[in-house]
Amino acid sequence: MDKQKAILILLFLIPLLLVLFFFGPFLLFSFVDSSWYYSEEVDIGPLDYSSALTKAEKAGYEVEGFWPWPGNFLGFEPGDVPEVRERFGAAALVENIRLNYDENSELIVFICENDSETEAGTGTCVAISNLSHSDPESPLQLSEFPPDVWMLEKFGLLFGLDENASEKYLEALKIAAQNQTWDAEIQVNESPDFPAVYAYLKENSDDSSHESSLGVNAYPTEVFLKDGNRLGSVKYFVPEAKVVTYDNENRYIVELDSSGKVRLEIVMPPGSSGDTIPEEEYRAVFREIFGEMGLSPEAVDSFEFFHSSSRIW
């Protein structure tokens, strides 16, 4: 009797296992797959990035990403440069400054990185590099430096130094070159006078352009040209964040950066493939979020939404 029961159970399980083998993944995906809505990026104009995120947090929303807090990222305050504030927002920082002597040689200024986990950076680093330097394991030769006159002028411009102080930094850079490879780098106590540097680049260039690298560290870069040659460039850090909340189990996401660029998204719960939300309903939720963040609720009307049911593929 026990043997017959075992055979009957086995005969029942084999077809069931075959059904699960062939159709199980489709049944699983029907529960995992979600519907979602998304918009393209829209520039809603100037915004108070820090205030918007603070208000979002006070309203009970989740805030993810880069805040303009000290230690979050490395960069210099741009100071009173209206063009930069208008383009990238008040929370943007200057990631680095490059002044070009020729197509190979350039002077670079950036925040020195620190190995400490508690400090993002310490002091200002100044480096000279030359792309024609062929051996990365050998020191940069003094003959590969730009002329002293050019170097002294740029030290004075960058840090507001007199000639004596500029000469000390130049001598320190030449000494550092003997003990380092590939390029020469020193640390100084001053922060760059960015408004003066930016004014110099604007006044001495006859053309400019903006570049963006791809990937996570996609810092926008402003390039200044003179007679078709690179005069210098500035790389900016534009902080960005996500503000997240839930309504009827749907996840509403507002992605924004300090320049005013915003993207909206709604992720519906697992198993919602093919489901939809009335447009006026989800727009009303976003209007409420915008209002809580101190942004104009009417700005939501400028977004066009697209619907998809294949988020996991």
Image (spheres, helix red, strand yellow):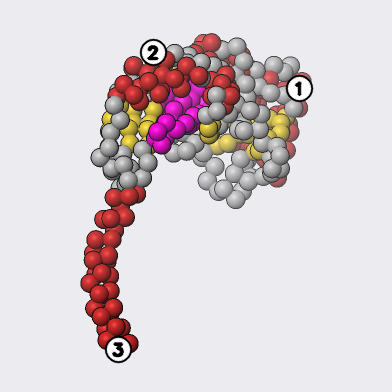
Which class describes the residues within 10 Å of circle 1: few (<14), some (14-19), or many (20+)? some
Q: Is residue 75 left or right of residue 226?
A: right
Q: Is residue 100 left or right of residue 281?
A: right
> Could you tell me what secondary structure mostly forms the magenta stretch?
strand
Which one is closest to the eye, mark 2 or mark 3?
3
Mark closest to the chain's N terminus, 2 or 3: 3
Q: In the rendered view, tell whether residue 10 sits above or below residue 260.
A: below
Given the image, on which type of amino acid does mark 2 rest?
Glu
Secondary structure beneath disc 2?
A: helix
Per the rendering, the mark at residue 104 is none
Secondary structure beneath disc 3?
A: loop
Secondary structure beneath disc 1?
A: helix
Farthest-out residue, front: 1
Is residue 78 shown to the viewer in this render?
yes
Q: Which residue is mark 3?
A: 1
Q: Are marks 1 and 3 in contact (CB under 8 Å)?
A: no
Front one among 52 and 151:
52
Q: Which residues are magenta?
A: 234-263
Which one is closest to the eye, mark 1 or mark 3?
3
Front one among 58 and 84:
58
What is the total number of numbered labels drawn onto the structure image? 3
Tell me the CA gap for discs 1 and 2: 54 Å
Please name the residue shown 30% across and 89% down the image. 1
Given the image, on which type of amino acid does mark 1 rest?
Ala
Please name the residue shown 40% across and 23% down the image. 285
Mark closest to the chain's N terminus, 1 or 2: 1
Mark closest to the chain's N terminus, 1 or 3: 3
Tell me the CA gap for discs 2 and 3: 76 Å
Given the image, on which type of amino acid does mark 3 rest?
Met
Residue 138 belongs to magenta span: no
Q: Which residue is mark 2?
A: 298
Please name the residue shown 62% across and 21% down the image. 77
